[in-house]
């Protein structure tokens, strides 16, 4: 993934302000050629805004978008040679699958024979041959997504942008499509930005994740880095399901412990009371109450629970936060 | 069977109303068109075979009026569609004060035709109207705009366009607003310019709305009466007379009800053939 300096996509101090409201605040980000970066965050965090700035659909209030060292700022969306898969897929309803794929080539003046050749190749790659005469309204959600992908690939883009491309599909299909999507998109020359609010999708699709909140970049790194070494409480809470437990242990210190890192231990330091259990088949989730607050614990589905369970954990799994700012506190906590 | 009976029962009031205000008058016209019913018969209907229809075929005034009506409808509707599309595209763009502008645009349409036509007649009045006053103040001399066929025809069309263009624009604006924004964005990303987006995306998606506007306006313009009656009275020398006006004159001025019914029915049949034929053609085009 490492290439020459300046290659790939680079965002420098990128800002977007609308009506005095900061939608995106000084974003610095780099995506290498062939890398898939997931922009992750809750609704309104600025991830779609970022995508639109890269595509040139909205103007940046400040900052730069650089591709292979070239500033894209003055280029129109068409000149940037980017492809985007929209959340709605944005298929042209009056055209057949074929027409949808061909329109961009026609607009760019690709000659008939060449057009047919490229069209045939992409129809075959995405197994759309039998659907070529259908209108978008006659396609299923998964088929529409394939057409949108095909259209993006035909663009031969220098940057590939995807705006929640799976959010209109059902959960099972989403899971099935992840490897397929990765095979088609990633590992080519162009950088890929994949916007999603679903952490599972981000972890499954991306080489690295950039987590945004309220227009600010919280952390960027591999899924493993974000999970194991979160920069702050927001990152710790956003990644990992069920969400991390936050325990108000002492004034000025908050302890974060993931449900999967707590275990039942007869001599554990934390006494708890069982409220409820959810049986998930491969695991069970315990809802507990303790003197430091409510707890979620993941454990073996067949384990028998003592009436007054005690909990333990390994010190390396402790994550400490400032309770007010949410900033990560490094160094050891108190000794038990 | 039971459901069928129930649905017929539910539709009955509408069907009865339609029969009363549409089917019955039509049948009555049909019957009347085979009667002589004028001052000569003491306004009593007397069967006269197909005399009225024979007269119609030879009536140069009818065919001149048919041509004039068609010419008026085609010209004004074409201008309204083109202008309405332009206005709709303009009003669809994010402009400051767009809401106010939209409301203002609709004003001419809200005016009753009679009031509007009287207004135009006053504007064009020779020599007292404001248009002539303006010409004189610029050093020219008054002109009888409603005294020559060409200028009268021009202003009849202009007045109709002025009044109904906003309606067409509003209808097309509603159509524009049904087009999701991301479709245009997708095409922009493909490298399309504004004209290409209009030609390849916006216009094709507006076709149903354009067709609707065309049918509405064509049906209305082919039956034009009030505007012409007030603005030009069909003159000068019958040069702006429409079929509806001719039918009205036959009934109310010449008191020849039999022939008036014939003209009315012939107008209706003409309209039916034109609009129905156009509709069928359009459907075949779309199916292909």
Image (cartoon, coloured by chain):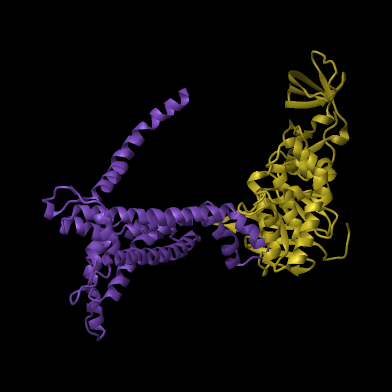
Q: Which residue is most to the top?
A: A307
- Which quarter of the rendered picture does the N terminus of chain A lie within? bottom right
Name the one closer to the observer, B106 or A97.
A97
Q: Is residue A110 left or right of residue B187?
A: right
- Where in the figure is residue A289, as x and y percent of width and height? 73, 22
Count how many numbered circles sit on residues in the image: 0
Above or below, A277 against B262 in this view is above
State the image coordinates of residue A236 (x, y, percent, origin top left): 76, 40
Name, please, the residue furthest toward the left. B42
Work out whether residue B123 or residue B161 is closer to the camera in this orientation and state it. B161
Can see residue B111?
Answer: yes
Q: Is residue A74 above or below residue A2?
A: below
Q: Nearer the viewer, residue A26 or A323?
A: A26
Residue that extends furthest to the front in the rendered view of this protein = B49
**Residue A164 visible somewhere in the drawing:** no
Q: Residue at x 75, y 26 (%)?
A: A295
What shade has chain A been given?
yellow
Query: B155 or B243: nearer the eye?
Result: B243
Residue at left offset 81%, top offset 26%:
A298
Q: Is residue B104 toward the left or the right of residue B247 in the image?
A: right
Chain letter, purple in picture: B
Q: Residue at x 78, y 68 (%)?
A: A69
Where is residue A313 drawn, in percent x and y?
86, 29
- Which quadrant is the C terminus of chain A positioned in? top right
**Furthest residue to the bottom?**
B139
Residue A221: % across, % down: 82, 49
């Amino acid at each position: 993934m490492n290439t020459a300096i300046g290659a790939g996509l680079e965002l420098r101090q990128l800002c977007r302000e609308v009506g005095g409201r900061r939608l995106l605040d000084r974003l610095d980000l780099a995506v290498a050629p062939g890398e898939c970066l997931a922009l992750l965050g809750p609704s309104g965090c600025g991830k779609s805004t970022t995508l639109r700035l890269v595509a040139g659909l909205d103007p940046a209030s400040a900052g730069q978008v650089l591709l292979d060292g070239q500033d894209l700022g003055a280029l129109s969306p068409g000149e940037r040679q980017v492809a985007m898969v929209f959340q709605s897929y944005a298929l042209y309803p009056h055209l057949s699958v074929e027409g949808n794929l061909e329109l961009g080539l026609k607009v760019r003046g690709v000659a008939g024979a060449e057009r047919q050749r490229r069209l045939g190749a992409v129809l075959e790659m995405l197994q759309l041959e039998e659907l070529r005469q259908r209108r978008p309204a006659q396609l299923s959600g998964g088929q529409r997504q394939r057409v949108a992908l095909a259209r993006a690939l035909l663009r031969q883009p220098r940057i590939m942008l995807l705006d929640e491309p799976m959010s209109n599909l059902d959960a099972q299909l989403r899971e099935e499509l992840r490897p397929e999507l990765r095979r088609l998109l990633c590992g080519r020359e162009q950088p890929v930005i994949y916007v999603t609010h679903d952490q599972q999708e981000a972890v499954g699709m991306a080489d690295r994740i950039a987590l945004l909140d309220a227009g600010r970049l919280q952390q960027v790194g591999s899924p493993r880095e974000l999970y194991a070494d979160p920069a702050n409480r927001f990152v710790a809470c956003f990644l990992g399901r069920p969400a991390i437990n936050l325990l108000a242990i002492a004034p000025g210190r908050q302890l974060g412990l993931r449900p999967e890192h707590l275990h039942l231990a007869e001599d554990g330091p934390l006494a708890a009371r069982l409220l409820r259990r959810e049986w998930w088949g491969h695991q069970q989730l315990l809802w507990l109450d303790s003197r430091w607050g409510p707890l979620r614990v993941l454990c073996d589905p067949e384990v028998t629970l003592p009436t007054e369970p005690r909990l333990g954990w390994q010190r390396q799994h402790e994550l400490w936060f400032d309770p007010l700012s949410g900033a990560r506190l490094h160094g050891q906590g108190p000794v038990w | 069977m039971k459901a069928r009976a129930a649905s017929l029962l539910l539709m009955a009031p509408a069907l009865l109303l339609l029969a009363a205000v549409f089917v019955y008058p039509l049948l009555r016209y049909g019957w009347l068109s085979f009667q002589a019913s004028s001052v000569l018969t003491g306004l009593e209907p007397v069967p006269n075979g197909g005399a009225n229809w024979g007269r119609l075929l030879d009536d140069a005034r009818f065919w001149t009026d048919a041509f004039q009506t068609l010419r008026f409808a085609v010209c004004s509707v074409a201008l309204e569609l083109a202008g309405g599309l332009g206005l709709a595209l303009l009003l669809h763009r994010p402009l400051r004060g767009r809401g106010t502008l939209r409301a203002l645009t609709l004003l001419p349409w809200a005016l009753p035709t009679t009031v509007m036509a009287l207004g135009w007649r006053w504007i064009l009045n020779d020599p007292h109207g404001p248009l002539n006053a303006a010409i004189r103040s610029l050093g020219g001399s008054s002109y009888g705009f409603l005294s020559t066929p060409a200028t009268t025809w021009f202003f009849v069309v202009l007045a109709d366009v002025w009044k109904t263009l906003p309606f067409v624009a509003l209808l097309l604006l509603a159509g524009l607003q049904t087009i999701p924004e991301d479709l245009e964005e997708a095409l922009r990303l493909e490298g399309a310019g504004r004209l290409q987006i209009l030609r390849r995306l916006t216009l094709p998606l507006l076709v149903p709305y354009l067709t609707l506007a065309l049918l509405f306006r064509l049906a209305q313009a082919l039956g034009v009466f009030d505007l012409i009656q007030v603005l030009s009275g069909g003159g000068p020398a019958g040069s702006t007379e429409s079929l509806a006006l001719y039918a009205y004159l036959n009934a109310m001025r010449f008191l020849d009800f039999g022939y008036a019914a014939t003209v009315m029915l012939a107008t209706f049949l003409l309209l039916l053939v034109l609009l129905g034929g156009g509709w069928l053609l359009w459907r075949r085009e779309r199916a292909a």
